[in-house]
Amino acid sequence: MKRIALCAAVLAVAFTSAAEAKGCIKGAIVGGVAGHMAGHGKLGAVAGCVIGHHEANKADKKAQQQTNQTN
């Protein structure tokens, strides 16, 4: 039951604002699986969400800089 509640909470936060959640879902899935293998699925999902969101923002900034340089 805790897993269902956690998944529902992660999805609710992720879909609240698509721009804010970019990378979070993918990172949470990967982190949750990796964390589950180590016995810390919830912690892995949270960390994966944070890292995925950070990496998505970095990629967006890099793409925006390249677009600005070509114009």
Image (cartoon, rainbow, N blue to C red):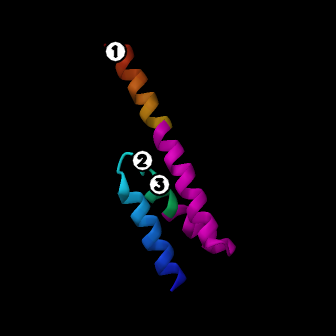
Q: Amino acid at mark 3?
A: Cys
Stretch in magenta = 29-57
Q: Residue at x 42, y 35 (%)?
A: 60
Residue under label 2: 20
Q: Residue at x 56, y 57 (%)?
A: 48
The front one of 18 and 39 is 18
Residue under label 3: 24
Residue under label 1: 70
Location of residue 41 with respect to 49 vertically, above or below: below
Is 50 included in the stretch rendered in magenta?
A: yes
Classify mark 1: helix, strand or loop.
helix
Q: Residue at x 56, y 64 (%)?
A: 45
Are the residues at dot 3 and dot 2 in contact (C-beta closer than 8 Å)? yes
Rate crowding at label 2 as few (under 14), some (14 to 19) or many (20 or more) other CA atoms within 10 Å: some
Q: Amino acid at mark 1?
A: Thr
Q: Specify the principal SS of the magenta part.
A: helix
Percent coordinates x, y for residue 23 in the rendering: 45, 50
In the current view of this chain or complex, which residue is farthest to the left?
A: 71
Q: Amino acid at mark 2?
A: Glu
Distance from label 3 to label 2 (Cα)? Answer: 8 Å
Front of the two marks 3 and 2: 2
Distance from label 1 to label 3 (Cα)? Answer: 29 Å
Q: Earlier in the sequence, mark 1 or mark 2?
A: 2
Distance from label 1 to label 2 (Cα)? Answer: 27 Å
